[in-house]
Image: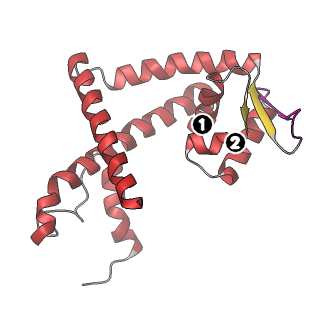
Amino acid sequence: MPVRTAAQRNVGRYEVMAGKEPALIDEENIIGEDADNRAQVRVWLRLLACTSLIGAELRRQFREEFDFTMPRFDVLAQLDREPVGLVLGELPKRLMVTAGNLTPIVDRLVEDGLITRSPSPLDRRVQIVCMTAEGRRAFRRMAKKHSLWLASLLAEFPKARLDGLVKELDDLKNAVKRATEEARA
């Protein structure tokens, strides 16, 4: 098998971002038993492409309209669900990121006055993060726009088909969860 350069290996990654399947996975590369898995590969690629396309547009909109990032919005979204705040250690689990990646995001939100971080009265080693009134107002403004942007991106897809797709994706998510649990058992 020929050695590929880093640029050649990244071609597929950029094609997925542009909504195309990478050339690395095509009929010629799938042989034998793998040929039976083409549908699964195509589903995974479509999900990745949709996520990449939508995510890129949302990031652009947040940057241009609010000078804000998606990770900061995601932290506020988690805190909006918890009116009394959240143990800081819970945030990385909910957002599926490392604590190290989350620290500068939380620091910036505190600096901007959108959240507070304070020690727990029960255990001073534990930090509690809460959204401020200003943070809640800012989040609500951004959440409304976020909803409108998504509606605009998906406007060509009829509601009945979206509802069906949500059901199918719920089934897929549950099947993947079961498969991963079985693999770990």
Q: Is 52 in front, or is 61? A: 52
Q: Earlier in the sequence, mark 2 or mark 1?
A: 1
- Screen quadrant of the N terminus: bottom left
- Element under label 2? helix
Image quadrant in which you'd find residue 137: top right
Q: Is 126 in front, or is 41? A: 126
Q: Which mark is residue 11?
A: none
Q: Residue at x 44, y 38 (%)?
A: 55
Asked whether, in this view, residue 28 is left or right of residue 78, the answer is left
Q: Residues within 10 Å of mark 2 (few under 14, many from 20)?
A: some
Asked whether, in this view, residue 22 is left or right of residue 28, the answer is right
Percent from the top left, x then y, of residue 119? 87, 37
Q: Is residue 161 visible?
A: yes
The amino acid at mark 2 is Ile
On whether residue 120 falls in the magenta region, the answer is yes
Q: Which mark is residue 69?
A: 1
Q: Residue at x 26, y 84 (%)?
A: 2
Percent from the top left, x then y, of residue 167? 27, 28
Q: Residue at x 10, y 71 (%)?
A: 32
Magenta residues span 113-123
Circle 2 residue: 105
Marks 2 and 1 in Cβ contact (< 8 Å): yes
